[in-house]
Each structure stands twice: as structure tokens, then as C-alpha cells.
Image (cartoon, rainbow, N blue to C red):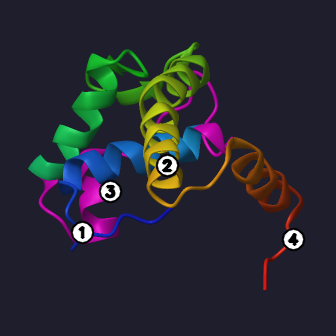
Amino acid sequence: MIPQLDGAKPIYVQISEWLETEILNGNFEKDQKIYSQYQLAEMFNINPATAAKGLNILADEEILYKKRGLGMFVAEIAKDRILKKRKNQTLKRLVSEIVMESARLNVSKDELIEMIRKEEIGEEEK
């Protein structure tokens, strides 16, 4: 997931979500130093203050922790916090949207479950 810097979501939120994904994918392990605000600013051609805001979201959620003078590091329970957050926020929102849309389209529960099963195993509906 590369931030869509022209998208509707604020850039600093996209940066924090991108870093979460990097942690979930194992690109950063617990107690490993993460990119600095200046590295992020250079990587994505954004203002360092915007990058710092994204990092601070993760620090506030205790996904990252600060070592004064050294930078930000991945918290020991970062993966668990990210998984819990994404299940409770992102996944619930997406499921709610799917259920509402399936009701509008008169798609049964069984049809919806079958669509999910097909997606899960990679079948394409023609």
C-alpha cells in the first residue's frame, strides 16, 4: 500500500496506515527503528511536519515509542494493536457497507457468503 497523496484521506493518516502495513508485513520488527520524519518526507515528497504528524498518531496509539535523540521504534505489542484496531474499525466498516449494499441489491446472505468464498480462493466471476 503506497500512500495516494492526492486522495481524499489526509496524507498524515495515509503515512500512519502505510507504516502500520509495513509493520504487519514484517518489514519492521519490535524494537526496530522506524523511518524518521525526514526520511518519510523525502520518500513521499511531503513536508516533514506532515510526516511527523503520521508518526505521532502511531506514538499516541502506542504502536511506536520514542527514544529521545534516537528516533521512533516499533513497540513490542505493535502488531497486536494494529490487528485489533483494523478489525474493530476498518473491517467492521467494510462489512457494514457490504451488508447495506447487498440489502439494496437484494443479495441473500448465502449469495454474499458464496461471493466471499470465491474471492477467498481466487475464483473470478465472469
Residue on which disc 3 sits: 39
Q: Looking at the rendered structure, which numbered label has been put on residue 103?
A: 2
Instruction: Specify start and end residues of the magenta stretch as a single range.
Output: 24-48
Q: Looking at the rendered structure, which numbered label has been put on residue 123?
A: 4
Q: Quadrant of residue 64?
A: top left
Q: Quadrant of residue 24?
A: top right
SS class, disc 1: loop
Mark 1–mark 2 Cα distance, whole angstroms, equals 29 Å
Mark closer to the observer (1, 4)? 4
| Dot placed on the residue nearer the N-terminal end, 1 or 4 | 1
| Dot placed on the residue nearer the N-terminal end, 3 or 4 | 3
Left or right, 57 with respect to 32, comes to: left
Mark 4–mark 2 Cα distance, whole angstroms, equals 23 Å
- In the rendered image, residue 102 lying in the magenta stretch gets the answer no
SS class, disc 3: helix
Mark 1–mark 3 Cα distance, whole angstroms, equals 21 Å
SS class, disc 4: loop
Left or right, 121 with respect to 15, comes to: right
Rendered residue at 48%/31% (across/down):
92
- In the rendered image, residue 25 lying in the magenta stretch gets the answer yes
| Dot placed on the residue nearer the N-terminal end, 4 or 2 | 2
- At label 2, counting other C-alpha atoms closer than 10 Å, the crowd grade (few under 14, some 14-19, many 20 or more) is few
